Image: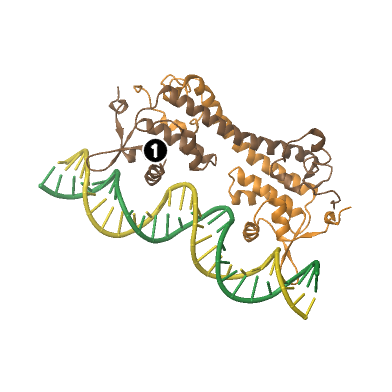
Chain colours: A brown, B orange, C green, D yellow
DNA sequence: GTAGGATCTCAAGCGTACTTGAGGTCAAGA
DNA sequence: TCTTGACCTCAAGTACGCTTGAGATCCTAC
């Protein structure tokens, strides 16, 4: 097989960068934050174990989803950096990631649902809309704490319409 | 009714801040960016028409979802700031928002689905996983361009496992 | 052994999204 | 009227997430 696939092959920062699409400067920054790790050559250059590719890939996906790096670090949890993570390590991490993703997704879904209703009725400016009249409608349906931040408009449109 | 609910009542920046949970300094900043608008009193203080509450609430929701302010401005599109937006104005805006939200949600869902598989098999470190072996599995299922950025790891784990 | 691209550190700069502070004005109640 | 809290502008500062540049070293191929 291709010698590039040896399990213990170490990658240079340039190789990491090319393979993950993440700039070398960003990789150094991530290392500074403790998001990734590397070993050094005798000449002080970084060498990355292959499993770091996975970490970096997950970091860049998370970034695209708007997750702050602190959360990302969090999400990695106990996944080790010095040794190749075990099956169980990644399993635990997967669960953490799922949880974080679910949170984000459900926030989006809630907003989407509210907007969907509004596309039909144009209600973002109409008092008939439940979204904008939580006292009338939401209270009756036992809606929770406050519907997103849109709830900041709770009292709106009681007598407002023009 | 409560005089605070008069349709043409104007709100001070402090009232806006309290009701939306957005700091006054942030409101000024949004105005600078053209995301919200206000009228001024004779003494140069800002007064907000009530429909600005809606704009501000949407801005803060979008922010929570990681949308940059430039996108938010975009998403408001033609919704007028000088006059109370019409039914049609908000309808158009709702569609734009929905589109943006859908994009984000589907990206999250894709990642979630991949991780769901992984929770079962812990495959983030196992070569049997389709996610990590697009050549074996994805190619066969006709998977598209590249599965998120995790595809950066395409060549991984061909001989890797420890 | 040597040229030259890759890498190193450290400091500074940048874009986004604000906050803070100084110094001054406005507005509403006693 | 006077006071006092809310508000104003403008400049500077902050946090995050990097990038850029300088000056030096590494390392691989010839």
Which residue corresponds to mark 1?
A36
Vertical placement of residue A35 versus C18, above or below = above
Residue furthest right in the image: B1
Question: In the image, is B121 to the left or to the right of D9?
Answer: left
Which residue does the image show at 43% across and 19% down from the upper left?
B128
Vertical placement of residue B25 versus B77, above or below = below
- Residue A100 point in image, percent of width and height: 56, 34
Answer with the quarter of the image where residue A8 lies.
Answer: top left
Which residue does the image show at 54% across and 24% down from the upper left?
B116
Which residue does the image show at 65% across and 48% down from the upper left?
B60
Screen quadrant of the N terminus of chain A: top left
Question: In the image, is B80 to the left or to the right of A103?
Answer: right
Count of numbered labels shown in the rendering = 1
Q: Chain of mark 1?
A: A
Question: In the image, is A1 to the left or to the right of B11?
Answer: left
Q: Can residue A50 be seen from the camera position used here?
A: yes
Q: Secondary structure at mark 1?
A: loop
Answer with the quarter of the image where residue A112 lies.
Answer: top right
């Amino acid at each position: 097989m291709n010698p590039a696939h040896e399990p213990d092959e170490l990658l240079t920062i340039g190789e990491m960068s090319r393979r993950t699409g993440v700039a070398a400067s960003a990789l150094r920054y991530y290392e500074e934050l403790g998001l990734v790790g590397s070993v050094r050559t005798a000449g002080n250059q970084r060498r990355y174990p292959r499993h770091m590719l996975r970490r970096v890939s997950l970091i860049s996906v998370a970034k695209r989803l708007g997750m702050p790096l602190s959360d990302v670090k969090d999400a990695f949890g106990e996944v080790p950096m010095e040794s190749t993570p075990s099956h169980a390590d990644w399993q635990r991490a997967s669960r953490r990631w799922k949880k974080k993703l679910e949170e984000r997704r459900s926030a989006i879904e809630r907003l989407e649902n509210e907007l969907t209703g509004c596309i039909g009725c144009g209600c973002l400016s109409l008092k008939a809309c439940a979204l904008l009249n939580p006292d009338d409608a939401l209270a009756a349906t036992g809606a929770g704490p406050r519907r997103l931040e849109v709830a900041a408009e709770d009292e709106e449109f009681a007598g407002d319409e023009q």
